[in-house]
Image (cartoon, grey):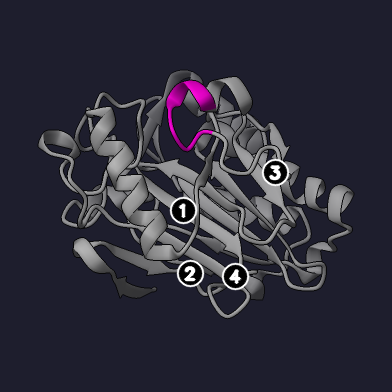
Amino acid sequence: MRAQHHAGGIVTWRFAVDGPDVTAVFTTRHGGCSSGPYAGLNLAYHVGDDPACVAANRSLVCEALGVDRLTVADQQHGCAVAVVDAALAGAGHGSEEDSRARLAGVDALVTDRPGAALAVLVADCAPVVLVDPVHRALGVVHAGRAGVCVDVVGATVRAMEERFGSCPPDLRAGVGPCIGAANYEIADGALDAVRDAFGDDLLQPTSEGRARFDLSAAVRRRLADAGVDGDAVDVMGVDTAAAGADLFSDRVARPCGRSMLIAALRP
C-alpha cells in the first residue's frame, strides 16, 4: 500500500497493479468538503450527505487522478456485471438517480476502454480490481458478504473472459480495505448464507448462533476458484472498522461516508 498526496489534502492508496498502464487507487477520507458523519472525502450520494459536497468531492478526485468522470453503479449486493462502453462511461457520476437509471443493480464493471474510470463505493465491503495486461482490460467489483456468497467475483472474471478473451491465469488482482474478521460478527440468515457458500472454513464461532466471518479470505477464495493465481493477488489488509482516522466504516458509525476504488486503463 503506497500513499499518494494530492492537492486539497486528498490522500489515495495505490494498489500494486497501479502503474504506467493502469490507474488503480483507493480513496481515504482525507481531503474533500463534507462535514459531520461524512467528514472529509465522502464520494457517495446515497448516504444523506449534501449532494453539492459529494459532487465537489468527485470533481476533486477526478482532477487529482486525471480522469474526466467516474462510472458509478447502483450497487445492490448482487452479482450483475456491466460492460462499460462509450455510452456507459461516466454513468452515475452526477447523481444517484443516474446510477439507478443506467446501471441499476450492478455490482461489478468491466471495460477495455482507455480512460473510462470505473468506481466501486465501499465502507466495509471489499473492493476488488482485476487487470488483464494481455488483452488490456480491467474490472472492478463490490464484494460484500452477500456478494461473495453469490460469487460476484467469479461472475466478473467470467465476464472478462467472455467479452475480452481474458484468461484467469493472466489476471492480476487487488483487494482493498474491508472489514476484518475480528470486527465482523454475523448471525441468523447471514450466517446461514455464508455456511451454504463456504462451509465453516471462514467462520470463527463466538457464541451460540454467531460467528466472525473473514470477508477478505472469502474474496481470495472466490478469486482462486475463478482461476486467478494466488501469487497475482495483492491484499491491502486494512480493517476498515479499525482505521477510523483514514477510512469510513458502516459498522462503526452509521450514517457515514463512502470511499472508492477507482481504476482506469491509461490512454
Q: Nearer the viewer, mark 1 or mark 4?
A: 4
Element class at badge 4? strand
Q: Which of marks 4 and 2 is in front?
A: 4
Element class at badge 2? loop
Residue bearing mark 2: 15
How many circles with numbers are drawn on the protein? 4
Q: In this view, does 115 lie to the left or right of 69?
A: right
Q: In which quarter of the image is residue 137?
A: bottom right
Residue type, label 4: Val
Which callout, 4 or 2, points at the residue further toward the start of the chain? 2
Which callout, 1 or 2, points at the residue further toward the start of the chain? 2
Highlighted magenta segment, given as a residue range = 92-98
Which callout, 1 or 4, points at the residue further toward the start of the chain? 4
Element class at badge 3? loop
- Visible residue check, residue 203: no
CA gap between label 3 and label 4 equals 16 Å
Residue bearing mark 1: 261
Label 1: how many residues lie within 10 Å, few (<14), some (14-19) or many (20+)? many
Q: Quadrant of residue 31?
A: bottom left
Label number found at residue 22: 4
Q: Which residue is painted at 57% across and 26% down in the image?
A: 193
Residue bearing mark 3: 84
